[in-house]
């Protein structure tokens, strides 16, 4: 597989960087965003290093979409969210910061509608991240 040492997501995939993983298969991995916009903010990442969504070959896209649906369903259940935003940024001007394709899954609640992407990002504690990632993992198992 094509992976890069200077890419933080490739380092997560290689096990050289810690992450709260909620899903892992041969081609795709999902883990909590380290600086979440909202609690439960999760990223779905291809194991192959592609710069952005537009660079993914079509035959890899179907699997990524299916896993995104699964993870989003689990995040919504685990976080008791009323809604979910699913999005990806392509290019610096669109807000892409890490140039390895990742799909954002961002829960939303009626009482706290759509967190702005420009909102100050949170720092999560280890215990908090463990609780959330375990809850999401359990929901994924329920779906399987
Ligand atoms: Zn990478």
Image (spheres, rainbow, N blue to C red):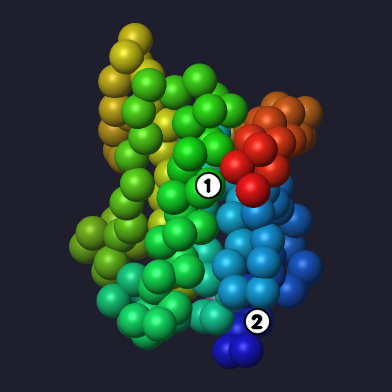
User: Is residue 105 found left or right of 30 in the rendered image?
Assistant: left
Q: Are marks 1 and 2 in contact (CB under 8 Å)?
A: no
Residue at the location (52% across, 64% down)?
Answer: 45
Residue at the location (46% across, 54% down)?
Answer: 68
Q: Is residue 40 visible?
A: yes
Ligand 1, by image quadrant, is bottom right
Q: Quadrant of residue 29?
A: bottom right
Q: Quadrant of residue 27?
A: bottom right
Residue at the location (47% across, 43% down)?
Answer: 72
Query: Mark on residue 1?
Result: none
- Measure the C-alpha gap from mark 1 to mark 2: 27 Å
Query: Mark on residue 5?
Result: 2
x and y percent of residue 78 in the render? 58, 28
User: In this rendering, is residue 71 above or below 112?
Assistant: below
User: Is residue 89 found left or right of 105 in the rendered image?
Assistant: left
Q: Secondary structure at mark 1?
A: helix
Q: Residue furthest bottom?
A: 2
Q: Earlier in the sequence, mark 1 or mark 2?
A: 2
User: Is residue 101 found left or right of 144 in the rendered image?
Assistant: left
**Callout 2: few (<14), some (14-19), or many (20+) C-alpha neighbours within 10 Å?**
few
**Callout 1: few (<14), some (14-19), or many (20+) C-alpha neighbours within 10 Å?**
many
x and y percent of residue 124 in the render? 64, 32
Q: Secondary structure at mark 2?
A: loop
Closer to the camera in the image, 137 or 88: 137
Q: Quadrant of the N terminus?
A: bottom right
Residue beneath disc 1: 71
């Amino acid at each position: 597989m094509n992976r890069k040492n200077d890419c933080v997501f490739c380092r997560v995939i290689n096990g050289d960087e810690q992450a709260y993983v909620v899903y892992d298969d041969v081609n795709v991995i999902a883990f909590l965003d380290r600086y979440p916009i909202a609690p439960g903010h999760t990223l779905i990442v291809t194991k192959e290093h592609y710069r952005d969504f537009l660079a993914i070959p079509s035959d890899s896209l179907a699997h990524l979409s299916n896993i995104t649906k699964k993870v989003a369903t689990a995040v919504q259940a685990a976080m008791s969210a009323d809604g979910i935003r699913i999005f990806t940024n392509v290019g610096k001007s669109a807000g892409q910061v890490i140039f390895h394709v990742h799909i954002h899954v961002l829960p939303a609640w009626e009482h706290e509608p759509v967190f702005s992407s420009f909102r100050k990002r949170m720092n999560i504690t280890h215990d908090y991240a463990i609780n959330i990632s375990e809850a999401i993992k359990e929901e994924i198992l329920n779906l399987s």
